[in-house]
Amino acid sequence: MIKDITIGQFFPGNSVLHRMDARVKILLTGAFIAMLFAAKSIEALAVGILFTLAAFLFSKIPLKMMGKSLKPIIPVIVFTALINLFFIRTGDLLWEWKFIKLTKDGVDTSLFMVIRIICLICGSSLLTYTTSPIDLTDAIEKLLSPLKKIKVPVHELAMMMTIALRFIPTLIEETDKIMSAQKARGADMETGNILQRAKALIPILIPLFVASFRHAEELALAMECRCYHGGEGRTRMKQLRMSILDLWGSLFCGVFLAGVIVINAVAGK
């Protein structure tokens, strides 16, 4: 399970999404999220589903990565589905047992929310799957550059956000090593009640915190050895440049976003 978590990982490639400007990809990810939350019906949400599948097709990322990106949030998906399924009492009654009632609105809303969350996670994961850490840092800094006028440390913020994101795979790998070592020493983490399982996590969390601080110290030392002093006077070997590919990608996303708006307008009449 731990090894299957792909949050924050980058998969090198030469696909359409890999070649797009990182700034455009960040903006399109925001537009994609707006598209999903703007959808008010299953028909409008179907447009978001088609966009997600098309994006994965253009990225050439294996579809199995979609399943791996969803594994960490399966409890959230199940909890959301159950909350909407059993606590929405409007609509036609489908099934009843004592105080439990299933209604048509509850089933529809539960299905709608689950699909929305799945599309949201899978679609937004493509940003880190197809963008290198350096490009992501530069893109965030460029997009936030107007804030420099009010003395906001944009470069430092972009650097911290990107380092935190890229540290996720490292910590996941470290967690897997610690769990394997503890199991080899006879630690039992899968049986017992909730309190016993929580206590079993202590031998994992303490070494993980120690390893996190060690990685942070090594990173800080490496940056100091390379004379890193923040964004002031910093130059870049690779400059971000937009191309016709970014224009086509923006138009492609705009068509789907407009489709959601049109479907909402037609359904609202």
Image: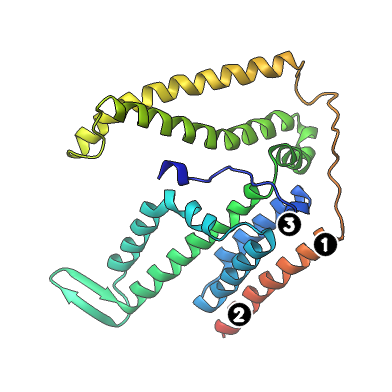
Q: Which residue does the image show at 69% across and 35% down from the upper left?
A: 158
Which of 202 and 173 lies nearest the eye of the viewer? 173
Q: Which residue does the image show at 45% across and 19% down from the upper left?
A: 210
Give the mark nearer the N terminus: 3 vs 2: 3
What's the amino acid at mark 3? Ser
**Quadrant of the rendering where the N terminus is positioned:** top left
Q: Which residue does the image show at 15% across and 73% down from the upper left?
A: 97
Where is residue 72 drawn, in percent x and y?
A: 43, 48
- The kind of secondary structure element at disc 3 is loop
**Quadrant of the rendering where the C terminus is positioned:** bottom right
Give the mark nearer the N terminus: 1 vs 3: 3
Which of 69 and 33 lies nearest the eye of the viewer? 69
Marking on residue 247:
1
Q: State yes or no: discs 1 and 3 in contact (Cβ < 8 Å).
A: no
Where is residue 23 drawn, in percent x and y?
A: 76, 48
What's the amino acid at mark 2? Ile
- Residue identified by numbered label 2: 263
Of circles 1 and 3, which is in front?
3
Q: Is residue 130 above or below residue 189?
A: below
Q: Which residue does the image show at 71% across and 37% down from the upper left?
A: 137
- Residue identified by numbered label 3: 15
What's the amino acid at mark 1? Leu
- The kind of secondary structure element at disc 1 is helix
**Residue 152 visible somewhere in the drawing:** no
